[in-house]
Amino acid sequence: MVTLDQALRAGLTRDELRHLCRSGRWQRLLRGCFVPNAELGDSTRRRARIRAAVVSLGPGAFVVLDTALELHGIAGLRRTAQVHVSVPADRPRHQRHPVPWLTVHQMTADPGEITEVAGIRVTAPLRTVSSRRSPGRSLSGGLGPRLGAESTAHRPISTDGDPEPHPRAARRRRGTGLPC
């Protein structure tokens, strides 16, 4: 994936970038993010989309939920084309044309809950798995109805069968009833 800044620093002009996209040699993924239309494998193209989503949403954006599970290599959920990225809860959401494969969330995360996988900011494995847990649903996706990502992210989190929310994991999440 190539950003607009990288292309301009490499000596391309905006007109040349437009020509590359119109001729089909490059594809625009999101605002300011491009990928050359070389023979890329599905996993490479998918990783480019994920990286483009994080880059285009600006500083503080990070991958969450099912997409974070995928980047960490945690099996269990069916793969979808959807990319889940969060922007900081205290920052206004970008007003942009909807992209069918991109879901933007606003979640809070402590700095220790964010890590990098292949240079992409993503929730840490423990945070990722705890964000996806919900009653009646296993990671295999075989039990219970699929809940919307927002409803899953705001459920109280428990550990080892403890019915009470785990304060560290649930702190500063909207809808948990725990103080910020």
Image: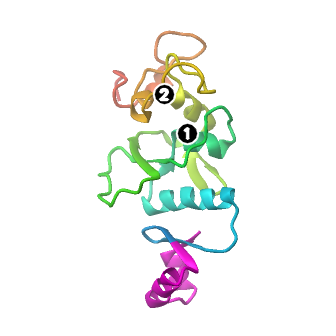
Give whichever of discs 2 and 1 has the lower sequence position. 1
177 vs 96: above or below = above
The extreme front residue here reads 23
Would residue 180 be visible to someone looking at this image? yes
Occupied quadrant, residue 138:
top right
The disc placed on residue 66 is 1
Name the side, left or right, on which 38 lies relative to 171: right
Does the magenta segment cover residue 72? no
Q: Secondary structure beneath disc 2? A: loop
60 vs 56: above or below = above
Where is residue 87 drawn, in percent x and y? Answer: 41, 49
137 vs 60: above or below = above
Seen from the viewer's position, the closer of residues 131 and 21 is 21
Where is residue 135 drawn, in percent x and y? Answer: 49, 17
Does the magenta segment cover residue 17? yes
104 vs 69: above or below = below
The disc placed on residue 146 is 2
User: Which portion, as a residue range, is magenta?
Assistant: 1-27
Q: Are marks 2 and 1 in contact (CB under 8 Å)?
A: no
Q: Mark 1: which amino acid?
A: Asp
Q: How is the image coloured?
A: rainbow
